Amino acid sequence: LANRAFHPEDTIIDVSGIPVGGGHMAMIAGPCSVESEEQVIDVAKAVKEAGANMLRGGAFKPRTSPYSFQGLGLEGLEMLCRAKEETGLPIVTELMSGEYLDIFDEKVDLIQIGARNMQNFDLLKQLGRTKRPILLKRGLNATYEEWIMSAEYIMASGNENVILCERGVRTFETYTRNTLDLQAIPVLKKMTHLPVVVDPSHAGGKWWLVDTMAKAALAAGTDGLMIEVHNNPDCALCDGGQSLKPEKYAVLLEQLRRIAPIV
Ligand code: PEP
Ligand code: MN
């Protein structure tokens, strides 16, 4: 279903009125985790002002350690909804369990499936119960074929609204969190007709790498960028070291506009 051979034109996914793919960019920004209503509304207003067209924020967080902040859960989701009311930005947030699918179907504009769940086949099959678009992140060590097969699971279950997200893969290098695979953009666009967006924040794991890699992704033909933005990165409960301050995000978007049309 994802194969370009049977569907030569680029698929454009409609995220609550925002087209993504075929020349339309998803500019997704926001904190790694929703920490409070004030925090997420502040960041939402700032990224909207900078030119973002979607707000991200984790309510359910897949953390490596069980002792790390696990997210505010449904309370966090309500805060995202408040930020959407304030700004009009569609919301993007991660679903970790089928248990919450119905409530996500009702409230979330773009449902994120994280790298760690890319091959949670039971969860992927359940996504056929919603028509909400799905942002499918690439697994930490997934090949292109494995990633496409995961998209295929979602599409075959009845939901063809899939956007792929390259977020870096694990390599022998430990200086950066992951290694951004820029080749994934042209390869996945050749193999599939689905939009491909890039998350340079989780790829490099360092805020100062985001700018360069975002520009590189744009030059390589990405259909969007998902970037972590926090109003006080030093105190962030999750991923502060890779988060841009809102001012830096605004400068980046200004520079990106000079390379290619974004939004
Ligand atoms: C995230 O987007 O906050 C996240 C946890 O990303 P990934 O699943 O790519 O690690
Ligand atoms: Mn994060």
Image: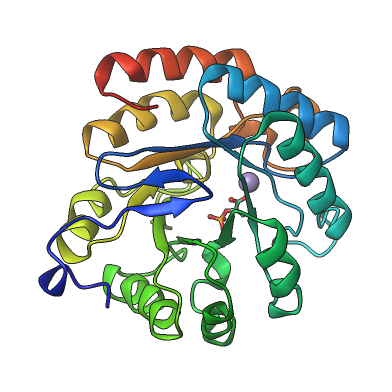
Residue 120 placement: quadrant: bottom right
Residue 99 placement: quadrant: bottom right
Q: Which residue sits furthest front?
A: 17
From where the camera sits, is residue 220 visible?
A: yes
Q: For the N terminus, which image quadrant? A: bottom left
Q: Nearer the viewer, residue 88 or 235?
A: 88
138 w.r.t. 72: above or below: below
Q: Residue at x 54, y 64 (%)?
A: 132
From where the camera sits, is residue 34 visible?
A: no
Residue 116 placement: quadrant: bottom right
Q: Nearer the viewer, residue 100 or 159?
A: 159
Q: Residue at x 31, y 48 (%)?
A: 21
110 w.r.t. 46: above or below: below
In the figure, is residue 133 to the left or right of 242? Answer: left
Q: Nearer the viewer, residue 242 or 149?
A: 149
80 w.r.t. 263: above or below: below
In the figure, is residue 51 to the left or right of 94? Answer: left
Q: Residue at x 47, y 41 (%)?
A: 176
Q: Residue at x 39, y 40 (%)?
A: 224
Q: Nearer the viewer, residue 26 or 122?
A: 26
In the figure, is residue 208 to the left or right of 147? Answer: right
Residue 51 drawn at (x, y percent): 51, 22
Q: For the C terminus, which image quadrant? A: top left
Residue 125 drawn at (x, y percent): 52, 85
Residue 165 drawn at (x, y percent): 42, 54
